[in-house]
Amino acid sequence: MLNVILLAWVLGIATMGKSNPTLLTLLPIFLLVSVTLWILARFPFYFVTTVFFKIVQGSCFAATAFIFGGQYANQALTERLQVRETQRQPVEVVVYVKSLNQLTENGLQQKVEVLGRHAQTVDWLLYLKQSQQKKSGSGLQLGQYYRISGQLKPAHSYATPGAFDQEKWWLQQDIMAAVRVETVQPISQAQVSRLGFTSHVQQQQGWWAQLRLGIEKMRLSCREFLQRQPVQHKGLLLGLLTGDQSLLYEATQAQFQRLGISHLLAISGPHVLIFAALVSWGLQQGIAALSGFESGCAGLGSSWQPAQFILCFFANLATEAGDRFSWF
């Protein structure tokens, strides 16, 4: 039952941006019926164990979760659109660096948290040229505050069908605007507190914020380690392992975008690697089990041939899988 509810919730979130007034009018009915069925299921009535009752109960729970998921997604989208920047203008803001930057051929891109622009903090994307990067050393440092000034650039979608929708992509990444940085000035936590952002400084001292910052620093260490290694396709390897696309060529990134698999270089990449590791571990355990079973059945002669074929099949499958990923 829980799996059905969670699946319906995910499907409801997938309808973000699509409002259906009919479903909203049916929500109180589904909610009331779901609560009633849940209460009836607590009593030892004979019909609560029937397949029909369970189907009706699961359908009502799924419908309620689907509508709630859609409403939650639309509410989150509305909140993001309210803090999205729509006009080009010069800006000077205080920012906090909590995410790893991304190197490009012309400089770097840095996602930062902007303080004081709205009631809550928002994320912007900074563009720094190579000359500015050299002035600030290796770029903006993780866990540091800066006062930056530059030209604000809102995101705009293109009307060409099939073109990459930058505005949608930014919204998915929770990026509300971009800034062409002109000046960068580091400031201390004490200065930030005097500007009225004491609560934000204290929040960054919490264990959860420190954990996330530590993870970003580990990703930076992985990038620097791979940069020093004499391996091929280090950009793809870094992207799949940590989601960092800094070592990828722009042509390769464009190919991933055209194929619609850019998510592999973001959060889905580590998931794919985890799944591949689980499959590899399962194959190894199966081969080891069959090998042990073969040694115990050595006296069976020709009757063991089917098991030998199975063992060869898994061995060839593992070999082919290794060949397919040899381009890493």
Image (cartoon, helix red, strand yellow):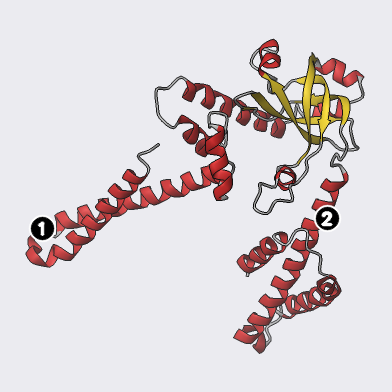
Q: Amino acid at mark 2?
A: Gln
* Residue 310, visible in the rendered structure: yes
Please give the name of the residue rendered at 53% of the width and 32% of the height, measured from the top-left corner: 248
In the picture as drawn, the residue positioned furthest to the front comes out as 160
Q: Residues within 10 Å of mark 1 (few under 14, many from 20)?
A: few
Inter-mark Cα distance, 1 to 2: 66 Å
What percent of the width, then of the height, locates residue 103?
A: 61, 26
What percent of the width, then of the height, locates residue 276?
A: 43, 48
Q: Which mark is residue 298?
A: 1
* Front residue of this view, candidates 219 and 40: 219
Q: Amino acid at mark 1?
A: Ala
Task: Tell me the quarter of the image containing the N terminus.
Answer: bottom right
Q: Residues within 10 Å of mark 2 (few under 14, many from 20)?
A: some
In the picture as drawn, the residue positioned furthest to the bottom comes out as 46
What percent of the width, then of the height, locates residue 259?
A: 54, 49
* Front residue of this view, candidates 119 and 59: 119
* Residue 284, visible in the rendered structure: no
Reading the image, the residue beneath label 2 is 75
Please give the name of the residue rendered at 64% of the width and 28% of the height, measured from the top-left corner: 100
109 is higher (above) or lower (below) than 147: below
Circles 1 and 2: CB distance less than 8 Å? no
Q: Earlier in the sequence, mark 1 or mark 2?
A: 2
Report helix, strand or loop for mark 1. helix
155 is higher (above) or lower (below) than 217: below
- Judge from the rendering whether residue 23 lies leftward or rightward of residue 139; answer left or right: right
Report helix, strand or loop for mark 2. helix
Dot in front, 1 or 2: 2
Please give the name of the residue rendered at 61% of the width and 65% of the height, measured from the top-left corner: 3
- Judge from the rendering whether residue 129 lies leftward or rightward of residue 26; answer left or right: left
Task: Tell me the quarter of the image containing the C terminus.
Answer: top left
